[in-house]
Amino acid sequence: MRLGILSDTHDNIWKLSEAFAHLQTADVVIHCGDLCSPFIVKRMGEALEEIPIHIVWGNNDGDPLTIARVAAGYPKIALHGQIAKLNIDGYQVGVNHYPVIATELAQSGNFDLVCYGHDHTVHESKVGACVLLNPGEVMGMNGRSTLAIYDTQTQQAEIIDL
Protein backbone atom coordinates (compact mmCIF):
# COMPACT_ATOMS: atom_id res chain seq x y z
CA MET A 1 0.00 0.00 0.00
CA ARG A 2 1.08 3.53 -0.73
CA LEU A 3 0.29 6.04 1.98
CA GLY A 4 0.28 9.74 1.16
CA ILE A 5 1.20 11.60 4.34
CA LEU A 6 1.05 15.35 4.84
CA SER A 7 0.86 17.82 7.68
CA ASP A 8 0.74 21.49 8.55
CA THR A 9 -1.09 22.78 5.49
CA HIS A 10 -1.97 26.03 7.27
CA ASP A 11 -4.35 27.09 4.49
CA ASN A 12 -1.67 27.08 1.76
CA ILE A 13 -4.05 26.14 -1.05
CA TRP A 14 -1.39 26.68 -3.69
CA LYS A 15 1.03 24.12 -2.27
CA LEU A 16 -1.85 21.78 -1.45
CA SER A 17 -2.90 21.93 -5.11
CA GLU A 18 0.65 20.90 -6.09
CA ALA A 19 0.45 18.03 -3.58
CA PHE A 20 -2.65 16.51 -5.18
CA ALA A 21 -0.74 15.08 -8.16
CA HIS A 22 1.35 13.03 -5.70
CA LEU A 23 -1.46 12.19 -3.30
CA GLN A 24 -3.62 10.87 -6.13
CA THR A 25 -1.10 8.03 -6.53
CA ALA A 26 -1.69 6.91 -2.93
CA ASP A 27 -4.07 4.20 -1.72
CA VAL A 28 -4.73 6.11 1.52
CA VAL A 29 -4.02 9.72 2.57
CA ILE A 30 -3.16 10.75 6.12
CA HIS A 31 -3.16 14.37 7.33
CA CYS A 32 -1.30 14.92 10.62
CA GLY A 33 -3.10 18.11 11.60
CA ASP A 34 -3.09 21.87 11.16
CA LEU A 35 -5.36 22.00 8.15
CA CYS A 36 -6.52 25.28 9.71
CA SER A 37 -9.70 26.13 7.74
CA PRO A 38 -12.67 24.05 6.61
CA PHE A 39 -12.02 24.87 2.96
CA ILE A 40 -8.86 22.71 3.08
CA VAL A 41 -11.05 19.68 3.86
CA LYS A 42 -13.34 20.57 0.96
CA ARG A 43 -10.43 20.82 -1.47
CA MET A 44 -9.02 17.50 -0.29
CA GLY A 45 -12.42 15.82 -0.54
CA GLU A 46 -12.93 17.06 -4.09
CA ALA A 47 -9.42 16.33 -5.38
CA LEU A 48 -9.06 12.92 -3.69
CA GLU A 49 -12.69 11.81 -3.87
CA GLU A 50 -12.00 8.07 -4.29
CA ILE A 51 -9.12 7.84 -1.79
CA PRO A 52 -9.73 7.33 1.94
CA ILE A 53 -8.46 10.34 3.91
CA HIS A 54 -7.68 10.16 7.64
CA ILE A 55 -7.26 13.43 9.57
CA VAL A 56 -6.18 14.19 13.15
CA TRP A 57 -6.54 17.57 14.83
CA GLY A 58 -3.63 19.96 15.14
CA ASN A 59 -3.28 22.90 17.49
CA ASN A 60 -4.22 25.42 14.77
CA ASP A 61 -7.35 23.75 13.46
CA GLY A 62 -9.87 26.51 13.96
CA ASP A 63 -13.60 25.95 13.69
CA PRO A 64 -13.69 22.20 14.30
CA LEU A 65 -17.49 22.19 14.05
CA THR A 66 -17.43 23.47 10.45
CA ILE A 67 -14.50 21.21 9.58
CA ALA A 68 -16.59 18.27 10.81
CA ARG A 69 -19.64 19.44 8.84
CA VAL A 70 -17.59 19.76 5.65
CA ALA A 71 -15.92 16.37 6.20
CA ALA A 72 -19.35 14.75 6.67
CA GLY A 73 -20.08 15.62 3.04
CA TYR A 74 -17.26 13.36 1.84
CA PRO A 75 -17.76 9.67 2.69
CA LYS A 76 -14.04 8.89 2.29
CA ILE A 77 -12.93 11.44 4.91
CA ALA A 78 -12.56 10.30 8.53
CA LEU A 79 -11.83 12.73 11.38
CA HIS A 80 -10.15 10.95 14.28
CA GLY A 81 -9.69 13.58 16.98
CA GLN A 82 -6.24 13.83 18.58
CA ILE A 83 -5.03 10.30 17.81
CA ALA A 84 -5.78 7.87 14.99
CA LYS A 85 -5.07 4.17 15.33
CA LEU A 86 -5.44 2.72 11.85
CA ASN A 87 -5.25 -0.80 10.53
CA ILE A 88 -4.47 -0.37 6.85
CA ASP A 89 -4.40 -3.75 5.19
CA GLY A 90 -2.91 -5.33 8.32
CA TYR A 91 -0.36 -2.52 8.76
CA GLN A 92 -0.71 -0.71 12.10
CA VAL A 93 -0.46 3.08 11.77
CA GLY A 94 -0.63 5.65 14.56
CA VAL A 95 -1.18 9.33 13.80
CA ASN A 96 -0.93 12.38 16.06
CA HIS A 97 0.04 16.00 15.59
CA TYR A 98 2.67 16.30 18.32
CA PRO A 99 6.23 14.84 18.27
CA VAL A 100 6.25 13.90 21.96
CA ILE A 101 2.98 11.97 21.75
CA ALA A 102 4.02 10.36 18.46
CA THR A 103 7.29 9.19 20.00
CA GLU A 104 5.35 7.61 22.87
CA LEU A 105 3.05 5.88 20.40
CA ALA A 106 6.07 4.54 18.52
CA GLN A 107 7.66 3.33 21.77
CA SER A 108 4.48 1.41 22.66
CA GLY A 109 5.35 -1.34 20.19
CA ASN A 110 1.78 -1.32 18.88
CA PHE A 111 2.50 0.29 15.51
CA ASP A 112 4.47 -0.36 12.34
CA LEU A 113 4.38 3.35 11.47
CA VAL A 114 3.65 6.49 13.49
CA CYS A 115 3.15 9.81 11.70
CA TYR A 116 3.11 13.29 13.18
CA GLY A 117 3.61 16.97 12.34
CA HIS A 118 3.64 20.19 14.39
CA ASP A 119 7.32 21.14 14.20
CA HIS A 120 7.31 21.57 10.39
CA THR A 121 10.46 19.46 10.08
CA VAL A 122 10.99 16.33 7.99
CA HIS A 123 12.02 13.46 10.22
CA GLU A 124 12.33 9.70 9.80
CA SER A 125 13.77 7.29 12.35
CA LYS A 126 13.26 3.83 13.76
CA VAL A 127 11.92 3.30 17.26
CA GLY A 128 12.33 -0.41 17.76
CA ALA A 129 10.54 -1.95 14.78
CA CYS A 130 8.36 1.14 14.26
CA VAL A 131 9.06 3.88 11.70
CA LEU A 132 8.53 7.36 13.17
CA LEU A 133 7.79 9.82 10.37
CA ASN A 134 7.15 13.53 10.06
CA PRO A 135 6.41 14.44 6.41
CA GLY A 136 7.36 18.05 7.03
CA GLU A 137 5.06 20.92 6.15
CA VAL A 138 2.93 21.70 3.14
CA MET A 139 2.78 25.33 4.27
CA GLY A 140 6.40 26.21 3.47
CA MET A 141 6.99 28.45 6.49
CA ASN A 142 10.54 27.18 6.82
CA GLY A 143 11.20 27.48 3.10
CA ARG A 144 10.52 23.87 2.17
CA SER A 145 7.08 22.44 1.34
CA THR A 146 7.01 18.65 1.55
CA LEU A 147 4.90 15.55 1.88
CA ALA A 148 5.74 11.86 2.12
CA ILE A 149 4.73 8.79 0.18
CA TYR A 150 5.25 5.73 2.35
CA ASP A 151 5.29 2.18 0.98
CA THR A 152 4.08 -0.35 3.56
CA GLN A 153 5.73 -3.24 1.68
CA THR A 154 9.24 -1.78 1.61
CA GLN A 155 8.77 0.37 4.75
CA GLN A 156 10.42 3.22 2.88
CA ALA A 157 9.35 6.86 2.82
CA GLU A 158 9.91 9.13 -0.14
CA ILE A 159 9.97 12.80 0.83
CA ILE A 160 8.62 14.93 -2.00
CA ASP A 161 9.42 18.61 -2.33
CA LEU A 162 6.60 20.73 -3.73
Image (cartoon, rainbow, N blue to C red):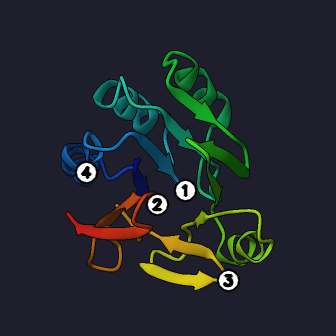
Amino acid found under the numbered disc labelled 4: Ala
Point out the image quarter for the C terminus: bottom left
Amino acid of disc 2: Asp
Q: Kindly report the distance in space between the C-alpha atoms of the residues bearing marks 4 and 1.
A: 15 Å
Q: Secondary structure at mark 1?
A: loop
- The residue wearing badge 2 is 8
In this rendering, does residue 142 appear at all? Answer: yes
Residue type marked 1: Cys
Q: CA distance from mark 2 to mark 4?
A: 13 Å
Sequence-wise, the earlier of marks 3 and 4 is 4
The answer to the question of whether label 1 and label 3 lie on touching residues, with beta carbons closer than 8 A, is no
- Which residue is drawn at the image coordinates 41% and 39% (left, top)? 40
Residue under numbered circle 3: 128
Is 101 or 58 nearer to us in this picture?
101
Residues under labels 2 and 3: Cα distance?
Answer: 26 Å
Q: Secondary structure at mark 2?
A: loop
* Residue at image mark 1: 32
